[in-house]
Amino acid sequence: MAKHFDLVVFDWDGTLVDSTAVIVASLQAACADAGLPVPSDERSMHIIGLGLYDAMAYVLPGVSTDVYPRVVERYGHHFRAGEPHTPLFGGVESMLKHLHGAGHQLAIATGKSRRGLDRALEKTALARYFHATRCGEESATKPAPAMLLDLMKTLGTTPERTVMIGDTTHDLQMAASAGVASVAVTYGAHPREQLLELRPIACAASSQDLWQWLKHNA
């Protein structure tokens, strides 16, 4: 069957890996460690996908940027402790193996740090399936289109032949800004209603639903 997309770009946290709860708990613990107001679950989930410093500005409005490094350091400490409890969603490795074998180029666009993503790829043994990856610290962060534009340039693809898959409005806004189709997944950080407002071409309620959609439409 002919491919509809040459390049399939995935977000990482909340899309391929079940890490939303650990991210929220780590951010809340980091704020508590620094003696700062602890953000709500909803506010904490909203920042998933953003670069850490953009996230700090959102969850700690009015707090001096001088405090950010302390919160970021404590966040990293708590997240690394919780990382062993962030498994892949069901069927993810089989999905990536199939897409890779079918000739698709696969990539990651994530707000994670390069160190964090490389550690996660090593832990999950998924690095072999990806042709390129981009992290928030390497270009303008989501929802800016920079990561997608860079990936398309690097891999020689066009917006019409690229699809972005993610669980946050930041992912879908990035795709729209880059002129790329998007697929929303509703099992991650952001509510289905917010994702649908950004008009993705499909909406998957589980990783298995995503896998089935990609089988027939990618």
Image (cartoon, grey):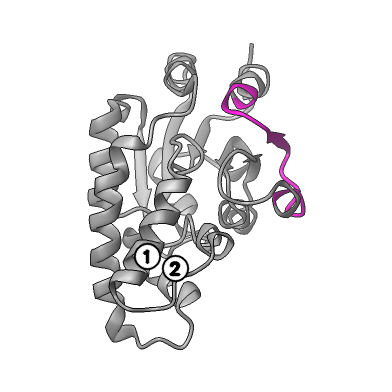
Residue at x 45%, y 55% (from the top left corner): 24
Q: Is residue 48 visible?
A: yes
Give amino acid for label 2.
Ala
The answer to whether 14 is drawn above or below residue 92 in the figure is: below
Residue at x 65%, y 54% (from the top left corner): 176
Read off the magenta span: 195-210
Q: Quadrant of residue 29?
A: bottom left
The residue to which callout 2 is attached is 55
Image quarter (top left, top right, bottom left or bottom right) of the N terminus: top right
Residue at x 24%, y 42% (from the top left corner): 118
Image quarter (top left, top right, bottom left or bottom right) of the C terminus: top right
The disc at residue 37 is none
**Residue situated in front as seen by the camera: 59 or 54:** 59
| Residue 165 picture location, percent across and down | 57, 39
**Residue situated in front as seen by the camera: 90 or 199:** 90
102 lies left or right of 74: right
The residue to which callout 1 is attached is 52
Q: Tell me the element at label 1.
A: helix
Give amino acid for label 1.
Leu
| Residue 179 picture location, percent across and down | 64, 52
The answer to whether 63 is drawn above or below residue 145 in the figure is: below
Within 10 Å of the Cα at label 1, are there few (<14), some (14-19), or many (20+) other Cα atoms?
Answer: many
**Residue situated in front as seen by the camera: 83 or 193:** 83
Separation of residues labelled 1 and 2 (CA atoms): 5 Å
State yes or no: discs 1 and 2 in contact (Cβ < 8 Å).
Answer: yes
| Residue 76 picture location, percent across and down | 26, 57
The answer to whether 72 is drawn above or below residue 130 in the figure is: below
Q: Tell me the element at label 2.
A: helix
123 lies left or right of 215: left
Residue at x 29%, y 35% (from the top left corner): 121
